[in-house]
Image (cartoon, rainbow, N blue to C red):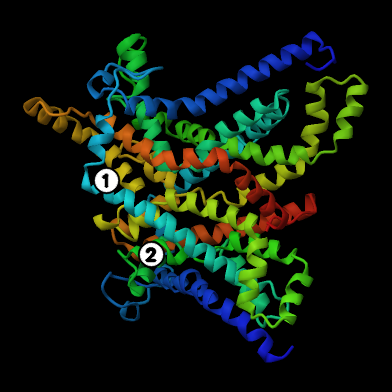
Amino acid sequence: MKSIRLAPKEKAFDLLNLIVLTLFGIVTLYPFYYIFIYSISDPTEALRGVYLLPRGFSLDNYRQLFQEQNILWAFFISVSRTVLGTIATLIGCTIFSYGISKPFLPFRKWMYGAVIVTMYISPGIIPVYLTMKTYGLYNNFLVYILPGVVVAFFVILIKTYMEDIPKEMEESAMVDGASAYTILWKVILPLCMPVLATVAIFNAVNQWNTWVDNLYLAPKPELQTLQLLLYTYVNQQNAALSMVTSASMSQHAVVLTPTSVQMTITFVATLPILLVYPFMQRFFLKGIMLGAVKG
Amino acid sequence: MARKHYTPYLLMTVPFFILILLFNFVPLWGWVLAFVDYTPGRSIADSPFAGLKYFRQLFDKTSDFGLVLRNTVVLSFLQLLLTPLPVALAIMITNVRKRWYSRVIQTVTSFPHFTSWIIVYSVFFAFFSIDDGALNKLLYSTLHWLDEPSNILAEPKYSWWLMTFATLWKTAGWTAIIFIAAIAGIDQEQYQAAEVDGANRWQQAIHITVPGIMPTFIILLLINIGNMLNIGFDQYYVFHNALVHERIEVIDTYTYRIGITQLNFSYATAAGMFKSFVSVALLFAANRFSRMTTGHSIM
């Protein structure tokens, strides 16, 4: 303990502060905990209400879920767009930022300006929809990847970072006759790892969570993401409710309730973020700090 | 500089620049749709010119665009009213003496920001739904405090408040982190001096912390004002249902429903364009105001 004696008022302040913050923390965390314990409860038992501990214990929800072809496929699509989209964005933003960071590059101001403008002007849903149709990207997996290869915010972050790298490092490599790509790959890239990690994490989380493009640009079932599948599921729940119970009564098979399935999909969709976020928080923080400098 | 010098760098930038043009600028031609009578399947060149017909239609008596605009402005305004809350949260977190605990609270409260609105909707559904929601389970079925199960997700009376609460739940923790960063930038000697003078921590918060983060607060507030009409699509799309439609439909969801679902492309584009232009105007106004008052530019 610190040697400073606290006045009673100060103590009251501390206590009240802790209580309010803890309550706020519980309001945020409990819903996720609730979803988790519901998903591992026995589905029929859970109908009586789940509060602090799971009711019964059963992994039937998960077992069943991973036998559903469409759910597995949606999971695969979500993972694919997250992995491929992040790789594409990293490559695109890094190469573009490196080129644009060269003061002698012709049209530099124009190209950079155009990138910045994209943060403020959006064509809107209908024009984008028609354009993607024209490009043949409607109902095409690439519609998840290509529009996000160059992202203004990431370009700002990476370019700012690259401009702070001492010129001498590049110059010595250039004297040795290395090409622009070799310098980028061998000299610049290793130094940019912190900012690239930030960009990768931001982008991966975005890709995992994005579903609006799925909704209006890729509505065919083969391209459904886990997010949109979950939404469709939650919305059809009322209709599905009677169906599942009547089916299960006659078959005596594994009984799943719509709510238990919903909780399980929700948890599966949240889990990657839950695993990544607490450990990667410093990268997210770095992102907003770097963004604040130039943004 | 010799031509040879910059060629490799042009090869690095130009292909990606073309991508930017293709995905961010080429679609702008679609705005033409707002000025013609377009029917899907026909080419735009064949569509008869309609002038400002669709823009006039937006503010027609028969149009529900006024209602949609009202919802957008009201919901944005409610969110603006709540902007001091993350500041309060940030001050509280920085006043926690145990460092590990303030870390835990930060991590926990900022977490929902990184989940999608679909997850948030599913969470709200799990708690507030009329069939199997945890709240009805507890208050109606178990404790019998309610005379009938509540269906807050389908109750237009509460929609605006529910949406504001949902926004708060999802974003307050993360916004607080931005303010925590601003608080870290305040000169620590001020606090030591105040302590010597006998100021308690409440007084320190009011007289040092609040003025210290005011510039950050004003800038974020102005950005939010500039984005008033860009309230977003995701949240209002997922929470939408027929019963709360009149309270929850905002410009972005309206554009989607009119355009993609009802295939009225021209009218939907006009609505989207209206939003874009008002937004840019608001943003410029906010930027000007920010430069006048704080000397900082927000763009």
For mark 1, what is the residue?
A71
SS at badge 1:
helix
Q: Nearer the viewer, residue A134 or B240?
A: A134
Is circle 2 on the same chain as circle 1? Answer: yes
SS at badge 2:
helix
For mark 2, what is the residue?
A143
Rendered residue at 81%/39% (across/down): B186
Which image quarter holds the N terminus of chain A? top right
Q: Is residue B132 left or right of residue A247?
A: right
Residue A212 in the image: x percent, y percent?
A: 39, 53
Q: Is residue A186 above or below residue B235?
A: below
Q: Is residue B168 left or right of residue B136?
A: right
Residue A164 in the image: x percent, y percent?
A: 75, 63
Q: Nearer the viewer, residue A98 or B83?
A: A98
Question: Mark 1, residues whose alpha carbon is within 10 Å: few (<14), some, or many (≥20)?
Answer: some
Residue A204 in the image: x percent, y percent?
A: 48, 52
Q: Alpha-carbon distance for marks 2 and 1?
A: 21 Å
Chain letter of disc 1 in the image: A
